Amino acid sequence: MFQQLIGLAGIGLVAGLATLSSSSTTEAPATEGAYTIDAVHSSALFSAVHLGMSRFYGRFNEMGGELSFDPKDPTKSKIKVEIAAASVDSNDTKRDQHLAGPDFFSAKEFETISFESKSVAVKRKATDEDALQLEVTGMLDMLGKKREVTAVVDLVGSGPGMRGGELIGFHTVFEINRSEWGMDYMNGPLSDEVEIILSLEAKR
């Protein structure tokens, strides 16, 4: 039970974007267009506090989606991310089964966690010292409930991939309250506030 409690950090994710790729990116400016999320080089992580004493991390292993980016007018950018709830991974098989079950993600009934942007605003323009930073607002659909969330998103980089094509990556860290989606199990011993780390690399 102790192991289960540590990992019940469930909550999927949302919005956002970023890169860390062995495909290598450069400082070349991004061009307008649509990109497909590369799940191999993307990460969706979550973190919750256990018993007020430690922070536990888990992840989802299966995701997909697409985004569009217009460097001349980033406010026209859009993103849609889909995550397989059953792919939750807390580094413990029994705990993963619990997380995928009805106490948490109920993955058989609600197979997909998704986020789709509604609006994008420029929070910080790109400079020689700082990357472009966007404020992305959209709907997070989880456990059959849709709630609006907003995340501050950094453009990590863009440029050609090692095998051709173009890559772009974004990164965001933000918090949600899992109870807003009806995930109330062990609320208290396991924090209601869940930190989301979403790092997406996309290609075309």
Image (tube, rainbow, N blue to C red):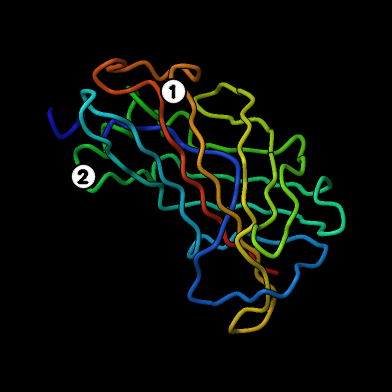
Residue farthest to the front?
129
| Residue found at the far right of this picture | 72
Marks 2/1 in contact by CB < 8 Å: the verdict is no
| Residue at the image position 60 percent from the left and 45 percent from the top | 16
Disc 2 marks which amino acid?
Thr
Q: At label 1, which amino acid type do we have? A: Arg
Task: Please give the name of the residue rendered at 48% of the width and 75% of the height, measured from the top-left corner.
Answer: 22
Q: Which mark is residue 57?
A: none
The residue beneath circle 1 is 178
User: Which is more foreground, mark 2 or mark 1?
Assistant: 1
> Where residue 85 appears, x then y in whole percent?
44, 39
Answer with mark 2 or mark 1, whichever residue precedes in sequence.
2
**In the image shown, does 159 or 179 lie closer to the viewer?**
159
Q: CA distance from mark 2 to mark 1?
A: 22 Å
Instruction: Name the residue that disc number 2 marks.
Output: 93
Residue 19 horizontal/vertical position (percent): 54, 62
- Residue nearer the viewer, 27 or 39: 27
For the point 51% across and 36% down, the residue is 174
Residue 100 appears at what percent x and percent y?
34, 34
